[in-house]
Amino acid sequence: GQNIDQPTEMTATEGAIVQINCTYQTSGFNGLFWYQQHAGEAPTFLSYNVLDGLEEKGRFSSFLSRSKGYSYLLLKELQMKDSASYLCAALDSNYQLIWGAGTKLIIKP
Amino acid sequence: ETGVTQTPRHLVMGMTNKKSLKCEQHLGHNAMYWYKQSAKKPLELMFVYSLEERVENNSVPSRFSPECPNSSHLFLHLHTLQPEDSALYLCASSPNTEHSNQPQHFGDGTRLSIL
């Protein structure tokens, strides 16, 4: 079957760096998305990776290793507003999105 | 971002009621989606519409009935729901569905509680 695994919850300190991991098992692969979802709000698009390597967007970076079925989202210089759930989703060979359950990130002062 | 608007934001209903959720997108997209989001579970895709035609129905119970009158509007009609249907219902849109890696744009959702 198809599956996405990511930690349920993580805690980090304001100003620090945190890495949220995601592993995927899909029938074929057409890329991986990261979304941010604040409580009671819409998931918002953060990044899309389809090639191996690191893509940087300001304080957020996303990494992909296709051979390992692995991605991570790296958040630097953490701010309180980064407290949210982070959703990992992979596109399979039919361009269907396979979603993870999300990682709730708690930022402490 | 207000590209996708959902109403109502909160809905409490009894198991015998009939209600409808509404979604409107102002992004000029051709595809619209309904998802169910339960705590600590992955998003569950319920329905997909492409150019007002239903292209996917993921074995959703018939007590959920979608309607897409045009490419900007999507409804989810609810009747005789069960307590386990309590969840956040998210609407999303994307430019198209065919072989697309374009990100989906989500509304804020309707928090549904079944008494």
Image (spheres, rainbow, N blue to C red):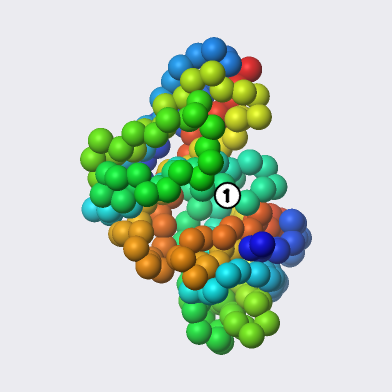
Q: Residue A95's spot in the image, x, y percent?
A: 45, 65
Q: Amino acid at mark 1?
A: Leu
> The N terminus of chain A appears in which quarter of the rendering?
bottom right
Depth check: give the residue in front, A2 or B22.
A2
Q: Residue B111's spot in the image, x, y percent?
A: 54, 32
> The C terminus of chain A appears in which quarter of the rendering?
bottom right
> Which chain hosts label 1?
B
Residue at the image position 74 percent from the left and 56 percent from the top = A8
Task: Quadrant for residue B47, please give it.
Answer: top left
Horizontal side, residue A20 vs residue B54: left or right: right
Task: Quadrant for residue A60, please give it.
Answer: bottom right
Q: Residue A86's spot in the image, x, y percent?
A: 61, 59
Q: Residue A27's spot in the image, x, y percent?
A: 58, 70
Residue B3 visible in rendering:
no
Depth check: give the residue in front, A83 or B85.
B85
| Residue under label 1 | B43
